Amino acid sequence: MQPDEWLVVLNPVSGRGQALRRQPEIVRLLELHGMRHSVAISRFHGHAIELVSAAVAAGCRRLLIAGGDGSLNEAVNAILAQDKVPPAEILLATLPVGTGNDWARSHRVPGNWPAAVALAASETSALHDAGVAEFGDGSRRWFINVAGVGFDAAVVERKMARGFGQLAYVLGLLGALWSYRPVAVRVSQDDGAAREASILVQFAALGRNCGGGMLIAPDAVPDDGRFASVLVHAMSRLEVLASLKCLFDGTLPGHPKVEASPCATIRVDAPTALAVEADGELIGHTPVTFRVLPRAIRVVVPATPE
């Protein structure tokens, strides 16, 4: 592929199959803006990693991901796992087609497809922090939006087969609430000493939104070299239900059972393995260390107003 040619990765299941059904419309929009391109369809979980890796090795430097947060996550993993090209030389754009589209929401990427393709064609870009989750077995996964340990991962498991957008997250939350129990963990940030805590969830946020629009980290800055750490201490079921609105209105960090602070590293250990999610995908189990990679990836986003 030529460096100015776009690889368009379509997720055929995102948004209940919209990207595949409307592929001709997407192609027309690309042609309207004179975007040379090839189209690849991701056929299984992890396939986008393979498609993007192969394209980058073949010379591709422009990627348009027609999917949701999970598809974007796979593209990020492909870009950051390879060592042949500096990741900042690869341009990553998204056409929001998924159920959550939280990363696009945080960055004001239009949900309107003609406007989103026009934005990609403009190549207006910025460097963006990435996160890496390092596991006890030596494996690692990268992410670009929000990672979580504990209850959040249990919700992700339940929402995968139910509903869409915020409704999927809320239904998953309510379903998981009856079986999930807060657990004792050891948490440390940066060079601080580890401390015991009974938690509901520990978030490591680069973006502001997760769960189909939940505003869990309103103060997150995507290029400052730090996570917005949001630790939610153990709550009763009634306390969780009474606090649901905090997930939507940006007041979660101010909740009396929430600790919010910026940091570059978060480590979580637990006596029994806890699920870990990132960008809405289950990626492993504790122990895990989250680290920020400052300004590690180049993304297409609207220009920031002066």
Image (cartoon, helix red, strand yellow):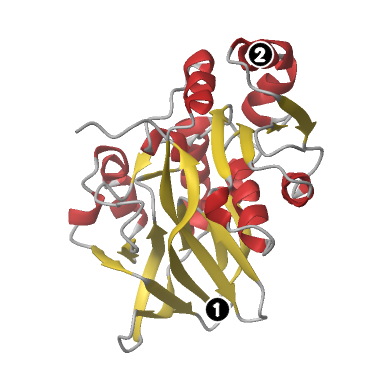
2 or 1: mark nearer the eye: 2
Numbered label attached to residue 233? none
Q: Specify the quadrant of the image occupied by residue 61.
A: top right
Residue at image position (36%, 51%) is 222
Q: Residue 134, image x and y in percent?
A: 57, 74
Quick one: 123 or 165, which is closer to the camera? 123
Label 2 Cα neighbours within 10 Å, binned few <14 / some 14-19 / many ≥20: few
Helix, strand or loop at disc 2?
A: helix
Left or right of 189? Residue 71 is right
First of labels 2, 1 by sequence position: 2
Q: Residue 41, image x and y in percent?
A: 78, 32
Q: State how far apart marks 2 and 1 are (Cα).
A: 47 Å
Numbered label attached to residue 287? 1
Label 1 Cα neighbours within 10 Å, binned few <14 / some 14-19 / many ≥20: many
Residue at image position (23%, 31%) is 305
Quick one: 4 or 274, which is closer to the camera? 4
Q: Is residue 178 visible?
A: no
Quick one: 44 or 169, which is closer to the camera? 44
Disc 1 marks which amino acid? Pro
Marks counted in the figure total 2
Q: Which residue is mark 2?
A: 31
Q: Please state, as top left, top right, bottom left or bottom right, where the C terminus lies in the image.
A: top left
